[in-house]
């Protein structure tokens, strides 16, 4: 076991908690857990702070609600825990869930603990330093993993009440518009125009699946040496809904600039030379794996994903201004969300 955990460092100011109280609780709830305990914080997890726990019994990961004043429906770690527990032993790779605690007196907020899954978390979608064939295999594995999730029988897994799939797009659009309005720090005309277009051009509902809500390469743990996904992380936004919303979010990289610190994508990069599939090929592979003949209303779903992402990023930025954001990069989201909104509006205004 090495001492260094990639992406983890000292617990940041404002995020410390009573580690002794945590160790006592986990010793009583997780078989084999025993101290001493050391805690580091992952830089990822823009919404729910995420920590690496090292104990005499092994390594674990803890996710908790953030400190500070929170929107009522945000930071739903109980939902994360429930859906990953339901996916255990399926062909959808997730970490093993170990304990959930909604007693705020232990460390200040609700939290859950899961297995630590060692492997590669690839934060740059251009995958620098990889040979083209490996990049192609990584993207094919991501595509396969998303298709597996969308084929999962959520009814048989007891998740029929995990969301309300009817009127999914209308409810999602209303939700993110409301959250954007609640955290708005300035007026960006592209955001308001994009919202109006989305409200006026909404397609019919799709057959629902489990929708992860944040399915991107940085939320996957890959095998240390193989192009194979070991775990899907960060399920806070998951629900029952339109699989094409997940797919469009996953494909936003095809519409965002290469090299951007927060919202980096492929625009301006030679993806063919890099071995990264083009958008059409990626969509064709997803259709083949899910039995689809076509993908209707693709521009709508992409525009919706850009709007939703801009609203989420604006919320991260607002929390950064309040001083309780869970990432050291949070203030960079102030520039990013404007760019994402303008990208979405340009997509639909092109006609």
Image (spheres, rainbow, N blue to C red):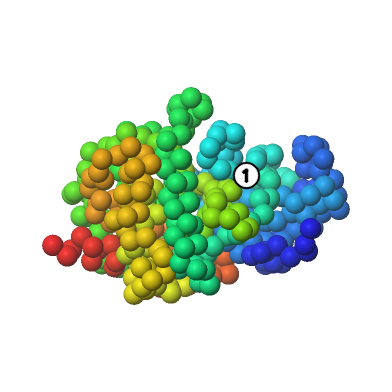
* Looking at the image, residue 236 lies above or below residue 343: above
For label 1, the SS is loop
Instruction: Tell me which residue sits at (32%, 44%) in the image.
Output: 287
Side of 124 where 116 appears, left or right: right
Identify the residue under disc 1.
Answer: 95
Residue 31's place in the image compared with 105, above or below, is above
Q: Nearer the viewer, residue 21 or 125?
A: 125
Instruction: Identify the image quadrant of residue 103.
Output: top right
Q: Residue at x 17, y 65 (%)?
A: 350
Judge whether residue 168 can be spotted in this image: no
Q: Is residue 285 visible?
A: yes
Residue in the foreground of this view, choosing between 305 and 88? 88
Q: In the image, 340: left or right of 29?
A: left
Q: Quadrant of the N terminus?
A: bottom right
The answer to whether residue 311 is above or below residue 29 is below
Choose top left, top right, bottom left or bottom right for residue 81. top right
Q: Position of residue 18 (x, y in %)?
A: 77, 54
Q: Position of residue 222 (x, y in %)?
A: 57, 55
Characterize the local packing of mark 1: few (<14), some (14-19) or many (20 or more) Cα atoms within 10 angstroms: many
Q: Residue at x 55, y 51 (%)?
A: 228
């Amino acid at each position: 076991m090495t001492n260094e955990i990639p992406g983890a460092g000292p617990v940041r100011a404002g995020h410390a908690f009573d580690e002794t109280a945590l160790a006592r609780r986990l010793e009583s709830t997780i078989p084999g857990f025993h101290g001493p305990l050391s805690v580091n914080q992952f830089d990822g997890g823009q919404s729910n702070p995420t920590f690496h726990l090292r104990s005499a019994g092994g390594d674990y990961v803890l996710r908790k609600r953030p400190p500070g004043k929170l929107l009522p429906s945000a930071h739903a770690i109980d939902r994360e825990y429930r859906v990953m527990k339901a996916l255990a032993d399926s062909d959808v790779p997730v970490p093993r869930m170990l304990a959930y605690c909604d007693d705020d007196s232990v460390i200040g907020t609700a939290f859950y603990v899961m297995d630590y899954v060692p492997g590669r978390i690839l934060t740059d979608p251009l995958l620098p330093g990889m040979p083209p064939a490996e990049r192609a295999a990584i993207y094919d594995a991501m595509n396969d993993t998303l298709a597996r999730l969308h084929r999962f029988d959520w009814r048989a897994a007891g998740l029929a009440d995990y969301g309300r799939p009817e009127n999914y797009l209308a409810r999602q659009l209303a939700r993110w518009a409301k959250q954007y309005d609640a955290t708005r720090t300035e007026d960006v005309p592209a955001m308001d125009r994009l919202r109006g277009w989305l409200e006026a051009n909404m397609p019919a509902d799709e057959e629902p699946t489990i929708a992860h809500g944040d399915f991107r390469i940085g939320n996957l743990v890959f095998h240390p040496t193989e192009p194979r996904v070991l775990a899907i992380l960060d399920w806070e936004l998951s629900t029952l809904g339109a699989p094409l919303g997940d797919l469009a979010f996953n494909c936003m990289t095809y519409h965002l600039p290469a090299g951007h610190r927060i919202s980096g994508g492929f625009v301006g990069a030679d993806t063919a030379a890099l071995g990264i599939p083009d958008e059409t090929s990626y969509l064709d592979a997803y259709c083949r794996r899910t039995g689809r003949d076509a993908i209707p209303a693709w521009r709508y779903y992409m525009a919706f994903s850009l709007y939703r992402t801009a609203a989420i990023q604006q919320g991260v930025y607002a929390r950064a201004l309040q001083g309780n954001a869970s990432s050291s990069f949070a203030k960079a989201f102030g520039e990013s969300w404007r760019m994402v909104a303008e990208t979405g509006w340009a997509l639909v205004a092109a006609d």
